[in-house]
Amino acid sequence: MATFQQHHDSLTRLETALDQKVSELSTAINQKEIRAEIKDLTSSIQGLLERARVVAEEQESEGEKGVMLDKLARHEKELDRLKGGVRKATLQAQEAAQKRSAQERSELLEGVTGQSVR
């Protein structure tokens, strides 16, 4: 069984990776692949949180248990923050796609109008 510190370190690495994917998502043209990666990372983080909680709850020392549970609470808050970032980045990417689409339509219409005027 992994130690709490190993779970904590893995959570930190996964949170960093998730944060990077959130940043990529807001500017991505093709969101599908990045969203799948985000879903996998989120699921991994949630699983690790559960396993780390089990390890923390098994501690005999209330002091150690309390420290571990505090760290878990911080990881849970970070996950909530990242989930909010995912929602925001998804909306930004959708808005950017809509603007690109509107721009393309506008350019096409200008091309058609410009040709018919000649």
Image (spheres, grey):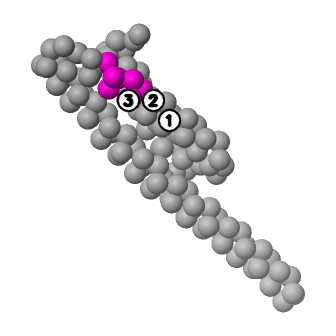
What numbered label is drawn on residue 49?
A: 3
**What amino acid is found at the position of numbered circle 1 in the picture?**
Ser
- Compared with residue 70, is residue 118 higher up or lower down, i.e. above or below? below
Report which residue position mark 2 lands on.
47
Q: Residue at x 87, y 87 (%)?
A: 116
Query: Magenta span: helix, strand or loop, mainly?
Result: helix
Q: Is residue 22 left or right of residue 37?
A: left
Q: Mark yes or no: residue 20 visible.
A: no
Q: Residue at x 55, y 64 (%)?
A: 95
3D distance between C-alphas at marks 1 and 2: 6 Å
**What amino acid is found at the position of numbered circle 3 in the picture?**
Leu
Q: Quadrant where the C terminus lies? A: bottom right
Q: Residues within 10 Å of mark 2 (few under 14, many from 20)?
A: few
Residue 72 lies, in percent from the top left, at 28, 30
Q: Quadrant where the N terminus lies? A: top left
What numbered label is drawn on residue 43?
A: 1
- Compared with residue 36, is residue 48 higher up or lower down, i.e. above or below? above
Outermost residue toward the bottom?
Answer: 117
Q: In the rendered structure, which segment of residues is drawn in magenta?
A: 48-55
Q: Residue at x 52, y 55 (%)?
A: 90
**What amino acid is found at the position of numbered circle 2 in the picture?**
Gly
| Residue 101 located within the stretch drawn in magenta | no
The answer to whether marks 1 and 2 mark residues whose Cβ atoms lie closer than 8 Å is yes
Q: Residues within 10 Å of mark 3 (few under 14, many from 20)?
A: many
